[in-house]
Amino acid sequence: MIKMNTFKTLAFAAVAISLFAFAPFTTENDTDKSADTDIVSLAVQTDILSTLVAAVQAADLVEVLQSEGPFTVFAPTNEAFAALPEGTVESLLLEENRDMLIAVLTYHVVPGKVMSTDLSDGMSAETVQGGQVTIGVGDGVTVNGANVVLADVEASNGVVHIIDAVILPEPETESGY
């Protein structure tokens, strides 16, 4: 079982990394600078990950992503969150659904730094949430069917792979997480 502090740290790392990954990089030098910046600092500068940032803040996971890590985050874009059924994001952000929000966010985080070159087809990885994600490699990289649209965005405490869908863990009970 994952301790709550570790769980929060990993969940926040996922969100912060997600924000960072879509930071506008225009040159190779800009990308090199990102590896010297922690996930949180980079994430808050990325508009395309603002929904993820809001979720990390609501889950009180900000400090977690400021820790050493390393973390691998599969970061959903704002469009990925918008594709969820109407009202889902708003519901997850409610205080009474905080445990569900933490479960969803930490399902997007894998301990350690896993670069795209480390991935293989059919590979399985345990998430901070405790569930498993499956990697697909073919015409592109997928995580539980979500396409990786930007890979290997490095931060001082991990790496982010931006994905085009929110991946959801299996519910722990019939009524939810």
Image (cartoon, rainbow, N blue to C red):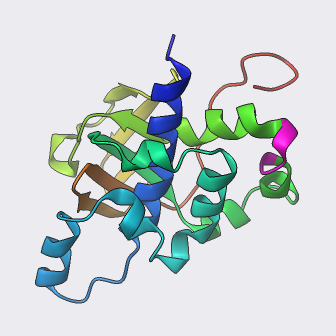
The residue sitting at the top extreme is 1
Q: Quadrant of residue 86?
A: bottom right
Picture layout, residue 101 above or below residue 3: below
Most common SS among magenta residues: helix
Q: How many marks?
A: 0
Q: Quadrant of residue 60?
A: top right
Q: Is residue 100 left or right of residue 162?
A: right
Question: Is 134 rendered above or below residue 35?
Answer: above
Query: Which one is nearer the viewer's eye here, 79 or 16?
Result: 16
Question: Does residue 112 appear in the picture of this structure?
Answer: yes
Residue shown at 28% from the left, 36% from the top:
121
Q: Which residues are magenta?
A: 92-96
What residue is rendered at 45% in x and 57% in y? 16
Please tell me which residue lies in front, 133 or 55.
Answer: 55
**Residue nearer the viewer, 134 or 131:** 131
Side of 29 where 113 appears, left or right: right
Can residue 162 be seen in this snapshot?
A: no
Q: Is residue 2 above or below residue 150?
A: above
- The spot of residue 1 in percent (x, y) is 51, 10
- Residue 100: x percent and y percent? 73, 34
Location of the C terminus (image quadrant): top right
Q: Residue at x 26, y 48 (%)?
A: 158
Residue 127 at x, y = what percent? 44, 29
The residue under the point 26% across, 34% down is: 112
In the image, farthest residue toward the front: 63
Q: Residue 128, percent across and down?
A: 46, 28
Is residue 8 within the magenta segment? no
The outermost residue toward the bottom is: 26
